Image (cartoon, coloured by chain):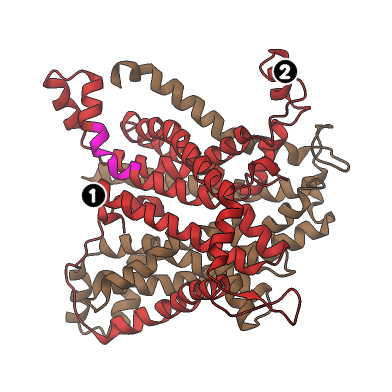
Chain colours: A brown, B red
Amino acid sequence: MRGFGKWGIWVYAGMAFTFLLIPIVYTIAFSFNDARRTNILWRGFTFDNWLNVCDAQTVCEAFGTSILIGVVATFLATTLGTMIAIALVRYRFRFRNTTTLLIFLPMTTPEVVLGAGLAAQFLQAGVPKGLGTIILAHTLFCLSFVVVTVRARVASIDPALEEAGRDLYGNPRQVFWRITFPMLLPGIVAAALLSFALSFDDFIITNFNRGAEVTFPSYVYTAAARGIPPEANVIASAVFFLAIALVLIAQVSAAVRRRQLAATT
Amino acid sequence: MAFTAFSSSSTAAEPAVARRSPIALFLLLPGILYLILFFVTPLISLVITSLQEPDPLRFGTFTNAFQWENYVIVLETYGEQSLRSAGFAALATLFALLIGFPLGYFIGITLRPYPLLQGLALVLVIAPFFISFLLRTLAWKQIFSDEGFVAGVLSALAILPPGQAITGTAFSVIFGLTYNFIPFMTLPIYATLASLDLRLLEAGNDLYGSPAVTFRTVTLPLSAAGVMSGTLLTFIPAAGDYINASREFLGSTDTTMIGNVIETNFLVLQNFPAAAALSLVLMAAILILVSLYVKRSGTEELL
Protein backbone atom coordinates (compact mmCIF):
# COMPACT_ATOMS: atom_id res chain seq x y z
CA MET A 1 0.00 0.00 0.00
CA ARG A 2 2.74 2.42 0.89
CA GLY A 3 4.89 2.12 -2.21
CA PHE A 4 1.94 2.89 -4.43
CA GLY A 5 0.46 4.91 -1.61
CA LYS A 6 2.90 7.82 -1.60
CA TRP A 7 1.24 9.60 -4.51
CA GLY A 8 -1.33 7.11 -5.65
CA ILE A 9 -3.47 7.48 -2.57
CA TRP A 10 -3.57 11.27 -2.89
CA VAL A 11 -4.77 10.96 -6.48
CA TYR A 12 -7.29 8.26 -5.61
CA ALA A 13 -8.64 10.23 -2.65
CA GLY A 14 -8.83 13.39 -4.77
CA MET A 15 -10.90 11.54 -7.33
CA ALA A 16 -13.16 10.09 -4.64
CA PHE A 17 -13.74 13.54 -3.12
CA THR A 18 -14.55 14.98 -6.54
CA PHE A 19 -17.00 12.14 -7.11
CA LEU A 20 -18.68 12.82 -3.77
CA LEU A 21 -19.02 16.52 -4.57
CA ILE A 22 -20.40 16.31 -8.12
CA PRO A 23 -24.14 16.10 -7.31
CA ILE A 24 -23.74 18.68 -4.54
CA VAL A 25 -22.18 21.20 -6.91
CA TYR A 26 -24.83 20.34 -9.48
CA THR A 27 -27.69 20.93 -7.02
CA ILE A 28 -26.22 24.23 -5.85
CA ALA A 29 -25.49 25.41 -9.40
CA PHE A 30 -29.05 24.72 -10.50
CA SER A 31 -30.39 26.82 -7.62
CA PHE A 32 -29.05 29.76 -9.68
CA ASN A 33 -30.61 28.55 -12.91
CA ASP A 34 -32.94 30.95 -14.66
CA ALA A 35 -35.39 28.08 -15.11
CA ARG A 36 -38.85 28.97 -16.17
CA ARG A 37 -40.80 25.74 -15.98
CA THR A 38 -38.45 22.81 -15.60
CA ASN A 39 -35.09 23.01 -13.91
CA ILE A 40 -33.31 20.46 -16.10
CA LEU A 41 -31.49 22.50 -18.74
CA TRP A 42 -29.18 25.39 -17.92
CA ARG A 43 -30.78 28.63 -19.07
CA GLY A 44 -28.63 31.30 -17.49
CA PHE A 45 -27.54 32.67 -14.13
CA THR A 46 -29.93 34.46 -11.81
CA PHE A 47 -30.35 35.32 -8.12
CA ASP A 48 -34.15 35.42 -8.46
CA ASN A 49 -34.70 31.95 -7.02
CA TRP A 50 -32.74 32.86 -3.90
CA LEU A 51 -34.45 36.22 -3.49
CA ASN A 52 -37.97 34.91 -3.97
CA VAL A 53 -37.82 31.42 -2.48
CA CYS A 54 -41.33 31.58 -1.14
CA ASP A 55 -42.84 32.37 -4.52
CA ALA A 56 -43.05 28.63 -4.85
CA GLN A 57 -45.42 28.48 -1.90
CA THR A 58 -45.72 24.72 -1.63
CA VAL A 59 -41.93 24.34 -1.40
CA CYS A 60 -41.76 26.85 1.42
CA GLU A 61 -44.64 25.28 3.34
CA ALA A 62 -43.11 21.83 2.99
CA PHE A 63 -39.84 23.23 4.31
CA GLY A 64 -41.62 24.72 7.33
CA THR A 65 -43.36 21.41 8.03
CA SER A 66 -40.03 19.57 7.90
CA ILE A 67 -38.45 22.04 10.34
CA LEU A 68 -41.37 21.70 12.75
CA ILE A 69 -41.24 17.88 12.63
CA GLY A 70 -37.45 17.92 12.98
CA VAL A 71 -37.52 20.17 16.06
CA VAL A 72 -40.23 18.25 17.92
CA ALA A 73 -38.88 14.79 17.04
CA THR A 74 -35.34 15.85 17.96
CA PHE A 75 -36.50 17.17 21.32
CA LEU A 76 -38.38 13.96 22.14
CA ALA A 77 -35.67 11.61 20.88
CA THR A 78 -32.86 13.51 22.58
CA THR A 79 -34.67 13.55 25.93
CA LEU A 80 -35.63 9.88 25.91
CA GLY A 81 -32.31 8.78 24.40
CA THR A 82 -30.13 10.71 26.85
CA MET A 83 -32.00 9.18 29.79
CA ILE A 84 -31.44 5.68 28.40
CA ALA A 85 -27.76 6.40 27.68
CA ILE A 86 -27.13 7.50 31.27
CA ALA A 87 -28.89 4.43 32.65
CA LEU A 88 -26.92 2.11 30.36
CA VAL A 89 -23.55 3.42 31.47
CA ARG A 90 -24.21 4.17 35.12
CA TYR A 91 -26.59 1.54 36.41
CA ARG A 92 -26.84 -2.17 36.77
CA PHE A 93 -30.24 -3.60 36.03
CA ARG A 94 -31.96 -6.78 34.97
CA PHE A 95 -32.68 -7.50 31.30
CA ARG A 96 -29.68 -5.42 30.36
CA ASN A 97 -28.93 -7.40 27.21
CA THR A 98 -32.56 -7.41 26.12
CA THR A 99 -32.65 -3.65 26.60
CA THR A 100 -29.50 -3.13 24.54
CA LEU A 101 -30.89 -5.34 21.81
CA LEU A 102 -34.16 -3.41 21.81
CA ILE A 103 -32.25 -0.16 21.36
CA PHE A 104 -30.04 -1.39 18.53
CA LEU A 105 -32.57 -3.42 16.56
CA PRO A 106 -34.25 -0.35 15.00
CA MET A 107 -30.86 0.62 13.52
CA THR A 108 -30.48 -2.75 11.80
CA THR A 109 -34.04 -2.71 10.52
CA PRO A 110 -34.48 -1.36 6.98
CA GLU A 111 -36.46 1.85 6.84
CA VAL A 112 -39.19 0.31 4.66
CA VAL A 113 -39.88 -2.21 7.40
CA LEU A 114 -40.02 0.45 10.13
CA GLY A 115 -42.28 2.58 7.95
CA ALA A 116 -44.60 -0.25 6.93
CA GLY A 117 -44.78 -1.55 10.52
CA LEU A 118 -45.81 1.81 11.95
CA ALA A 119 -48.27 2.34 9.12
CA ALA A 120 -49.80 -1.10 9.73
CA GLN A 121 -50.12 -0.30 13.42
CA PHE A 122 -51.72 3.10 12.81
CA LEU A 123 -54.09 1.46 10.34
CA GLN A 124 -55.15 -1.23 12.81
CA ALA A 125 -55.54 1.25 15.64
CA GLY A 126 -57.53 3.58 13.38
CA VAL A 127 -55.14 6.49 13.97
CA PRO A 128 -55.39 9.04 11.14
CA LYS A 129 -52.00 9.66 9.52
CA GLY A 130 -50.61 13.17 9.55
CA LEU A 131 -48.19 15.46 11.35
CA GLY A 132 -48.53 13.50 14.63
CA THR A 133 -47.78 10.12 13.13
CA ILE A 134 -44.74 11.51 11.28
CA ILE A 135 -43.35 12.94 14.53
CA LEU A 136 -43.91 9.64 16.36
CA ALA A 137 -42.11 7.75 13.58
CA HIS A 138 -39.17 10.17 13.43
CA THR A 139 -38.72 10.09 17.21
CA LEU A 140 -38.46 6.31 16.98
CA PHE A 141 -35.65 6.12 14.45
CA CYS A 142 -33.72 9.05 15.95
CA LEU A 143 -33.86 7.51 19.44
CA SER A 144 -31.31 4.74 18.83
CA PHE A 145 -28.83 7.14 17.25
CA VAL A 146 -29.12 9.46 20.24
CA VAL A 147 -28.45 6.61 22.67
CA VAL A 148 -25.32 5.54 20.76
CA THR A 149 -23.95 9.08 20.52
CA VAL A 150 -24.64 10.16 24.10
CA ARG A 151 -23.53 6.84 25.60
CA ALA A 152 -20.00 7.38 24.35
CA ARG A 153 -19.97 10.76 26.10
CA VAL A 154 -21.37 9.43 29.39
CA ALA A 155 -18.71 6.73 29.41
CA SER A 156 -15.98 9.37 29.14
CA ILE A 157 -17.07 11.28 32.29
CA ASP A 158 -15.17 10.50 35.44
CA PRO A 159 -17.73 9.43 38.08
CA ALA A 160 -15.41 10.85 40.75
CA LEU A 161 -16.57 14.35 39.77
CA GLU A 162 -20.15 13.49 40.62
CA GLU A 163 -19.03 11.86 43.85
CA ALA A 164 -17.20 15.06 44.74
CA GLY A 165 -20.44 16.95 44.16
CA ARG A 166 -22.29 14.59 46.51
CA ASP A 167 -19.53 14.83 49.11
CA LEU A 168 -20.01 18.59 49.05
CA TYR A 169 -23.63 18.06 50.03
CA GLY A 170 -25.08 18.64 46.60
CA ASN A 171 -28.50 17.02 46.33
CA PRO A 172 -29.03 14.67 43.35
CA ARG A 173 -30.75 17.40 41.36
CA GLN A 174 -27.88 19.86 41.88
CA VAL A 175 -25.30 17.20 41.06
CA PHE A 176 -27.11 16.38 37.84
CA TRP A 177 -27.75 19.92 36.58
CA ARG A 178 -24.44 21.45 37.73
CA ILE A 179 -22.03 18.60 36.99
CA THR A 180 -23.40 15.77 34.86
CA PHE A 181 -25.51 17.76 32.43
CA PRO A 182 -22.92 20.42 31.50
CA MET A 183 -20.36 17.68 30.88
CA LEU A 184 -22.83 15.72 28.77
CA LEU A 185 -23.85 18.76 26.77
CA PRO A 186 -21.44 18.36 23.82
CA GLY A 187 -22.67 14.79 23.36
CA ILE A 188 -26.29 15.86 23.65
CA VAL A 189 -25.80 18.67 21.13
CA ALA A 190 -24.11 16.28 18.68
CA ALA A 191 -26.95 13.79 19.12
CA ALA A 192 -29.57 16.50 18.61
CA LEU A 193 -27.91 17.75 15.43
CA LEU A 194 -27.67 14.20 14.11
CA SER A 195 -31.36 13.60 14.95
CA PHE A 196 -32.42 16.76 13.24
CA ALA A 197 -30.41 15.91 10.13
CA LEU A 198 -31.86 12.38 10.02
CA SER A 199 -35.39 13.66 10.52
CA PHE A 200 -35.10 16.52 8.05
CA ASP A 201 -33.86 14.28 5.24
CA ASP A 202 -36.02 11.24 5.91
CA PHE A 203 -38.26 10.20 3.09
CA ILE A 204 -38.98 6.47 3.29
CA ILE A 205 -40.48 6.21 6.79
CA THR A 206 -42.26 9.54 6.34
CA ASN A 207 -43.86 8.40 3.10
CA PHE A 208 -45.58 5.49 4.86
CA ASN A 209 -46.93 7.63 7.69
CA ARG A 210 -47.59 11.09 6.31
CA GLY A 211 -51.18 10.82 5.06
CA ALA A 212 -51.74 14.09 3.22
CA GLU A 213 -49.00 15.99 5.06
CA VAL A 214 -46.17 17.24 2.81
CA THR A 215 -42.60 17.39 4.11
CA PHE A 216 -39.71 18.77 2.09
CA PRO A 217 -38.44 15.35 0.90
CA SER A 218 -41.94 14.14 0.10
CA TYR A 219 -42.52 17.34 -1.88
CA VAL A 220 -39.37 16.65 -3.90
CA TYR A 221 -40.45 13.04 -4.47
CA THR A 222 -43.88 13.91 -5.83
CA ALA A 223 -42.53 16.83 -7.85
CA ALA A 224 -39.76 14.68 -9.35
CA ALA A 225 -42.08 13.36 -12.05
CA ARG A 226 -42.99 16.78 -13.44
CA GLY A 227 -39.82 18.68 -12.62
CA ILE A 228 -38.49 20.24 -9.45
CA PRO A 229 -38.72 24.03 -9.19
CA PRO A 230 -35.34 25.74 -8.61
CA GLU A 231 -36.66 26.99 -5.25
CA ALA A 232 -36.26 23.43 -3.93
CA ASN A 233 -32.59 23.61 -4.91
CA VAL A 234 -32.34 26.94 -3.10
CA ILE A 235 -33.66 25.45 0.14
CA ALA A 236 -31.45 22.36 -0.11
CA SER A 237 -28.40 24.54 -0.85
CA ALA A 238 -29.14 26.92 2.02
CA VAL A 239 -29.47 24.00 4.44
CA PHE A 240 -26.22 22.59 3.06
CA PHE A 241 -24.29 25.84 3.59
CA LEU A 242 -25.67 26.21 7.10
CA ALA A 243 -24.73 22.65 8.06
CA ILE A 244 -21.24 22.95 6.55
CA ALA A 245 -20.70 26.25 8.36
CA LEU A 246 -21.68 24.65 11.68
CA VAL A 247 -19.37 21.69 11.13
CA LEU A 248 -16.47 23.87 10.02
CA ILE A 249 -16.84 26.13 13.06
CA ALA A 250 -16.78 23.05 15.28
CA GLN A 251 -13.69 21.68 13.48
CA VAL A 252 -11.76 24.93 13.61
CA SER A 253 -12.58 25.61 17.25
CA ALA A 254 -11.48 22.07 18.11
CA ALA A 255 -8.21 22.67 16.27
CA VAL A 256 -7.67 25.97 18.07
CA ARG A 257 -8.33 24.31 21.42
CA ARG A 258 -5.85 21.54 20.58
CA ARG A 259 -3.22 24.14 19.75
CA GLN A 260 -3.88 26.09 22.98
CA LEU A 261 -3.66 22.88 24.95
CA ALA A 262 -0.39 22.00 23.25
CA ALA A 263 0.95 25.49 24.02
CA THR A 264 0.12 25.31 27.72
CA THR A 265 1.54 21.86 28.38
CA MET B 1 -20.65 11.08 14.77
CA ALA B 2 -22.75 8.06 15.58
CA PHE B 3 -20.71 5.91 13.24
CA THR B 4 -17.63 6.39 15.32
CA ALA B 5 -19.48 5.21 18.38
CA PHE B 6 -21.10 2.42 16.41
CA SER B 7 -17.81 0.97 15.33
CA SER B 8 -15.09 1.70 17.77
CA SER B 9 -16.38 2.33 21.26
CA SER B 10 -16.43 -0.99 23.00
CA THR B 11 -19.73 -1.47 24.71
CA ALA B 12 -18.25 -2.22 28.13
CA ALA B 13 -20.99 -4.71 28.93
CA GLU B 14 -20.69 -4.05 32.64
CA PRO B 15 -20.32 -0.43 33.67
CA ALA B 16 -17.31 0.54 35.75
CA VAL B 17 -19.23 1.84 38.72
CA ALA B 18 -22.49 0.04 38.24
CA ARG B 19 -25.06 0.53 40.93
CA ARG B 20 -28.55 -0.76 41.29
CA SER B 21 -30.96 2.06 41.88
CA PRO B 22 -34.61 2.90 41.29
CA ILE B 23 -33.30 5.87 39.30
CA ALA B 24 -32.32 3.42 36.55
CA LEU B 25 -35.96 2.43 36.15
CA PHE B 26 -37.02 6.07 36.01
CA LEU B 27 -34.42 6.77 33.33
CA LEU B 28 -35.15 3.71 31.24
CA LEU B 29 -38.90 3.42 31.47
CA PRO B 30 -40.07 6.23 29.14
CA GLY B 31 -37.67 5.35 26.32
CA ILE B 32 -38.19 1.62 26.62
CA LEU B 33 -41.96 2.09 26.64
CA TYR B 34 -41.60 4.21 23.53
CA LEU B 35 -39.60 1.49 21.79
CA ILE B 36 -42.16 -1.13 22.79
CA LEU B 37 -45.08 1.00 21.59
CA PHE B 38 -43.54 2.14 18.32
CA PHE B 39 -41.07 -0.59 17.41
CA VAL B 40 -42.18 -3.88 18.97
CA THR B 41 -45.94 -3.55 18.54
CA PRO B 42 -45.58 -2.35 14.93
CA LEU B 43 -43.64 -5.55 14.23
CA ILE B 44 -46.49 -7.51 15.81
CA SER B 45 -48.93 -5.50 13.67
CA LEU B 46 -46.91 -6.54 10.63
CA VAL B 47 -47.18 -10.20 11.62
CA ILE B 48 -50.95 -9.89 12.12
CA THR B 49 -51.39 -7.98 8.86
CA SER B 50 -49.26 -10.44 6.92
CA LEU B 51 -51.63 -13.27 7.84
CA GLN B 52 -54.86 -11.46 6.94
CA GLU B 53 -57.22 -12.57 4.19
CA PRO B 54 -59.50 -10.45 2.00
CA ASP B 55 -62.82 -9.65 3.64
CA PRO B 56 -65.49 -11.44 1.58
CA LEU B 57 -68.13 -8.89 2.56
CA ARG B 58 -66.31 -5.62 2.05
CA PHE B 59 -64.19 -5.40 -1.07
CA GLY B 60 -60.68 -3.99 -0.58
CA THR B 61 -60.49 -4.65 3.17
CA PHE B 62 -58.93 -7.51 5.08
CA THR B 63 -59.83 -9.52 8.17
CA ASN B 64 -57.55 -11.27 10.63
CA ALA B 65 -56.84 -14.87 9.74
CA PHE B 66 -53.98 -17.33 9.53
CA GLN B 67 -53.32 -17.11 5.84
CA TRP B 68 -49.79 -18.54 5.84
CA GLU B 69 -49.99 -18.92 2.07
CA ASN B 70 -49.48 -15.16 1.84
CA TYR B 71 -45.78 -15.76 2.39
CA VAL B 72 -45.60 -18.42 -0.30
CA ILE B 73 -47.48 -16.17 -2.71
CA VAL B 74 -45.28 -13.11 -2.19
CA LEU B 75 -42.10 -15.14 -2.45
CA GLU B 76 -43.29 -16.71 -5.70
CA THR B 77 -44.54 -13.42 -7.12
CA TYR B 78 -41.64 -11.26 -6.03
CA GLY B 79 -38.76 -13.75 -5.89
CA GLU B 80 -37.02 -11.96 -8.74
CA GLN B 81 -37.23 -8.57 -7.04
CA SER B 82 -36.01 -10.01 -3.75
CA LEU B 83 -32.97 -11.60 -5.35
CA ARG B 84 -32.29 -8.43 -7.31
CA SER B 85 -32.32 -6.40 -4.07
CA ALA B 86 -29.77 -8.73 -2.51
CA GLY B 87 -27.59 -8.62 -5.63
CA PHE B 88 -27.78 -4.84 -6.12
CA ALA B 89 -27.12 -4.20 -2.44
CA ALA B 90 -24.17 -6.62 -2.41
CA LEU B 91 -22.60 -5.01 -5.49
CA ALA B 92 -23.16 -1.49 -4.14
CA THR B 93 -21.55 -2.56 -0.85
CA LEU B 94 -18.54 -3.96 -2.71
CA PHE B 95 -18.07 -0.79 -4.79
CA ALA B 96 -18.56 1.40 -1.73
CA LEU B 97 -15.84 -0.64 -0.01
CA LEU B 98 -13.49 -0.21 -2.97
CA ILE B 99 -13.94 3.56 -2.73
CA GLY B 100 -14.48 3.86 1.01
CA PHE B 101 -11.53 1.83 2.24
CA PRO B 102 -8.77 3.82 0.50
CA LEU B 103 -10.62 6.98 1.46
CA GLY B 104 -10.78 5.93 5.12
CA TYR B 105 -7.11 4.93 4.96
CA PHE B 106 -6.18 8.27 3.41
CA ILE B 107 -8.02 10.31 6.07
CA GLY B 108 -7.13 8.10 9.04
CA ILE B 109 -3.47 7.37 8.27
CA THR B 110 -2.08 9.48 5.41
CA LEU B 111 -3.58 12.70 6.74
CA ARG B 112 -2.81 11.99 10.40
CA PRO B 113 0.12 14.44 10.58
CA TYR B 114 -2.20 17.23 9.38
CA PRO B 115 -5.15 17.44 11.83
CA LEU B 116 -6.80 20.42 10.16
CA LEU B 117 -6.66 18.77 6.72
CA GLN B 118 -8.00 15.60 8.29
CA GLY B 119 -10.96 17.50 9.71
CA LEU B 120 -11.69 19.12 6.36
CA ALA B 121 -11.50 15.76 4.57
CA LEU B 122 -14.03 14.35 7.04
CA VAL B 123 -16.33 17.27 6.33
CA LEU B 124 -16.08 16.44 2.62
CA VAL B 125 -17.05 12.84 3.29
CA ILE B 126 -20.16 13.77 5.26
CA ALA B 127 -21.04 16.69 2.96
CA PRO B 128 -23.47 14.57 0.87
CA PHE B 129 -25.55 14.04 4.04
CA PHE B 130 -26.25 17.73 4.17
CA ILE B 131 -27.86 18.03 0.79
CA SER B 132 -31.22 16.38 0.31
CA PHE B 133 -30.90 12.64 -0.43
CA LEU B 134 -33.58 12.89 -3.10
CA LEU B 135 -32.11 15.96 -4.79
CA ARG B 136 -28.60 14.54 -5.03
CA THR B 137 -30.01 11.36 -6.55
CA LEU B 138 -32.01 13.44 -9.02
CA ALA B 139 -28.83 15.34 -9.83
CA TRP B 140 -27.25 12.07 -11.01
CA LYS B 141 -30.34 11.33 -13.05
CA GLN B 142 -30.00 14.64 -14.82
CA ILE B 143 -26.25 14.28 -15.28
CA PHE B 144 -26.87 10.88 -16.89
CA SER B 145 -29.89 12.02 -18.94
CA ASP B 146 -29.98 11.37 -22.68
CA GLU B 147 -29.28 15.02 -23.49
CA GLY B 148 -26.55 15.19 -20.88
CA PHE B 149 -22.80 15.46 -21.21
CA VAL B 150 -21.99 11.92 -20.04
CA ALA B 151 -24.40 10.23 -22.44
CA GLY B 152 -23.06 12.44 -25.26
CA VAL B 153 -19.44 11.48 -24.65
CA LEU B 154 -20.23 7.79 -24.24
CA SER B 155 -22.28 7.69 -27.46
CA ALA B 156 -19.56 9.55 -29.36
CA LEU B 157 -17.05 6.95 -28.19
CA ALA B 158 -19.52 4.25 -29.26
CA ILE B 159 -19.47 2.80 -25.74
CA LEU B 160 -23.16 3.50 -25.39
CA PRO B 161 -25.19 1.87 -28.20
CA PRO B 162 -27.64 4.22 -29.93
CA GLY B 163 -31.04 4.28 -28.30
CA GLN B 164 -29.62 2.99 -24.99
CA ALA B 165 -30.19 5.23 -22.00
CA ILE B 166 -27.90 5.28 -18.96
CA THR B 167 -30.67 5.83 -16.42
CA GLY B 168 -33.26 3.16 -15.79
CA THR B 169 -30.65 0.42 -15.95
CA ALA B 170 -29.12 -1.88 -13.37
CA PHE B 171 -25.91 0.13 -13.80
CA SER B 172 -27.48 3.45 -12.82
CA VAL B 173 -29.30 1.95 -9.81
CA ILE B 174 -26.15 0.29 -8.46
CA PHE B 175 -24.24 3.48 -9.19
CA GLY B 176 -26.78 5.53 -7.21
CA LEU B 177 -26.77 3.09 -4.29
CA THR B 178 -22.97 3.11 -4.22
CA TYR B 179 -22.78 6.89 -4.27
CA ASN B 180 -25.40 7.37 -1.59
CA PHE B 181 -23.83 4.95 0.87
CA ILE B 182 -20.10 5.72 0.47
CA PRO B 183 -20.07 7.89 3.64
CA PHE B 184 -21.62 5.05 5.67
CA MET B 185 -18.75 2.82 4.53
CA THR B 186 -15.96 5.37 4.86
CA LEU B 187 -16.69 6.73 8.35
CA PRO B 188 -16.44 3.50 10.38
CA ILE B 189 -13.32 2.45 8.43
CA TYR B 190 -11.80 5.84 9.10
CA ALA B 191 -12.71 5.54 12.79
CA THR B 192 -10.84 2.25 13.24
CA LEU B 193 -7.84 3.32 11.14
CA ALA B 194 -7.61 6.66 12.97
CA SER B 195 -6.84 4.81 16.20
CA LEU B 196 -4.39 2.36 14.59
CA ASP B 197 -0.96 2.58 16.18
CA LEU B 198 1.42 3.62 13.40
CA ARG B 199 4.32 1.93 15.19
CA LEU B 200 2.77 -1.39 14.21
CA LEU B 201 3.19 -0.47 10.56
CA GLU B 202 6.81 0.54 11.23
CA ALA B 203 7.35 -2.76 12.99
CA GLY B 204 6.05 -4.59 9.94
CA ASN B 205 8.46 -2.60 7.85
CA ASP B 206 11.38 -3.25 10.20
CA LEU B 207 10.70 -6.97 10.03
CA TYR B 208 11.28 -6.79 6.29
CA GLY B 209 7.60 -7.03 5.43
CA SER B 210 6.94 -5.54 2.02
CA PRO B 211 4.26 -2.82 2.07
CA ALA B 212 1.82 -5.34 0.62
CA VAL B 213 2.59 -7.92 3.31
CA THR B 214 2.39 -5.33 6.09
CA PHE B 215 -0.93 -4.16 4.70
CA ARG B 216 -2.34 -7.67 4.50
CA THR B 217 -1.08 -8.91 7.86
CA VAL B 218 -1.28 -5.74 9.98
CA THR B 219 -3.50 -2.99 8.57
CA LEU B 220 -6.28 -5.13 7.18
CA PRO B 221 -6.91 -7.31 10.27
CA LEU B 222 -6.80 -4.23 12.50
CA SER B 223 -9.40 -2.45 10.39
CA ALA B 224 -11.74 -5.45 10.27
CA ALA B 225 -14.18 -3.99 12.82
CA GLY B 226 -14.58 -0.83 10.73
CA VAL B 227 -14.99 -2.76 7.51
CA MET B 228 -17.63 -4.85 9.20
CA SER B 229 -19.77 -2.05 10.53
CA GLY B 230 -19.30 -0.17 7.25
CA THR B 231 -20.52 -3.17 5.29
CA LEU B 232 -23.59 -3.53 7.49
CA LEU B 233 -24.33 0.21 7.47
CA THR B 234 -24.22 0.10 3.67
CA PHE B 235 -25.85 -3.23 2.92
CA ILE B 236 -28.88 -2.91 5.21
CA PRO B 237 -30.21 0.43 3.95
CA ALA B 238 -29.22 -0.41 0.36
CA ALA B 239 -31.20 -3.66 0.41
CA GLY B 240 -34.35 -1.87 1.57
CA ASP B 241 -33.91 1.30 -0.48
CA TYR B 242 -36.51 2.19 -3.06
CA ILE B 243 -35.48 5.69 -4.11
CA ASN B 244 -32.57 4.81 -6.39
CA ALA B 245 -34.50 1.98 -8.06
CA SER B 246 -37.67 4.04 -8.45
CA ARG B 247 -38.79 5.00 -11.95
CA GLU B 248 -38.74 8.71 -11.16
CA PHE B 249 -35.11 8.46 -10.07
CA LEU B 250 -32.42 6.13 -11.45
CA GLY B 251 -34.46 3.00 -12.10
CA SER B 252 -37.16 1.60 -14.36
CA THR B 253 -39.65 -1.28 -14.25
CA ASP B 254 -36.69 -3.58 -14.97
CA THR B 255 -34.85 -2.60 -11.81
CA THR B 256 -37.65 -2.93 -9.23
CA MET B 257 -36.28 -3.83 -5.80
CA ILE B 258 -38.07 -5.27 -2.77
CA GLY B 259 -38.50 -1.78 -1.27
CA ASN B 260 -40.39 -0.63 -4.35
CA VAL B 261 -42.64 -3.69 -4.15
CA ILE B 262 -43.41 -3.09 -0.48
CA GLU B 263 -44.12 0.59 -1.13
CA THR B 264 -46.40 -0.10 -4.12
CA ASN B 265 -48.29 -2.86 -2.36
CA PHE B 266 -48.80 -0.82 0.78
CA LEU B 267 -49.40 2.69 -0.49
CA VAL B 268 -50.72 2.23 -4.02
CA LEU B 269 -52.38 -1.19 -4.34
CA GLN B 270 -53.33 -1.20 -0.63
CA ASN B 271 -52.54 -4.92 -0.54
CA PHE B 272 -51.44 -4.67 3.09
CA PRO B 273 -50.92 -8.40 3.77
CA ALA B 274 -48.52 -8.74 0.83
CA ALA B 275 -46.55 -5.64 1.89
CA ALA B 276 -46.41 -6.84 5.49
CA ALA B 277 -45.29 -10.35 4.55
CA LEU B 278 -42.54 -8.99 2.30
CA SER B 279 -41.37 -6.57 5.00
CA LEU B 280 -41.02 -9.42 7.46
CA VAL B 281 -39.19 -11.57 4.90
CA LEU B 282 -36.77 -8.69 4.31
CA MET B 283 -36.26 -8.11 8.02
CA ALA B 284 -35.73 -11.81 8.74
CA ALA B 285 -33.25 -12.16 5.88
CA ILE B 286 -31.26 -9.18 7.13
CA LEU B 287 -31.28 -10.34 10.76
CA ILE B 288 -30.03 -13.79 9.73
CA LEU B 289 -27.32 -12.27 7.55
CA VAL B 290 -26.24 -9.84 10.27
CA SER B 291 -26.04 -12.48 12.99
CA LEU B 292 -24.10 -14.90 10.75
CA TYR B 293 -21.78 -12.11 9.75
CA VAL B 294 -21.23 -10.90 13.29
CA LYS B 295 -20.64 -14.44 14.53
CA ARG B 296 -18.17 -15.27 11.74
CA SER B 297 -16.09 -12.18 12.18
CA GLY B 298 -16.23 -12.63 15.94
CA THR B 299 -16.77 -8.99 16.79
CA GLU B 300 -19.90 -9.21 18.84
CA GLU B 301 -19.22 -5.90 20.45
CA LEU B 302 -20.96 -4.28 17.51
CA LEU B 303 -24.31 -4.84 19.19
Residue B228's x, y, as percent?
34, 45
Q: CA distance from mark 1 to mark 2?
A: 48 Å
The answer to whether marks 1 and 2 mark residues whose Cβ atoms lie closer than 8 Å is no
Q: Give the farthest residue toward the left.
A: B207
Camera sees residue B7: yes
- Taking A184 as reference, is A67 left or right? right
Return the residue at label 2.
Answer: B155
Residue B137's x, y, as percent?
64, 42
* The residue stretch that appears in magenta: B219-227
* Image height of A110 relative to B253, above or below: below
Residue B255's x, y, as percent?
64, 42
Q: Which one is nearer the viewer's eye here, B50 or B103?
A: B50
* Labels 1 and 2 in the same subunit: yes
- Taking A215 as reference, is B26 left or right? left
| Chain of the residue under label 2 | B
Amino acid type assigned to the residue bearing label 1 in the image: Gly
* Image height of B295 relative to B34, above or below: above
Which secondary structure, mark 1? loop
Which secondary structure, mark 2? helix
Camera sees residue A188: no
Give whichever of discs 1 and 2 has the lower sequence position: 2
The residue at the point 20 percent across, 29 percent down is: B217
Return the residue at label 1.
Answer: B298
Residue A187 occupies which quadrant of the picture?
bottom left
- The C terminus of chain B lies in quadrant: bottom left
The residue at the point 57 percent across, 73 percent down is: B49
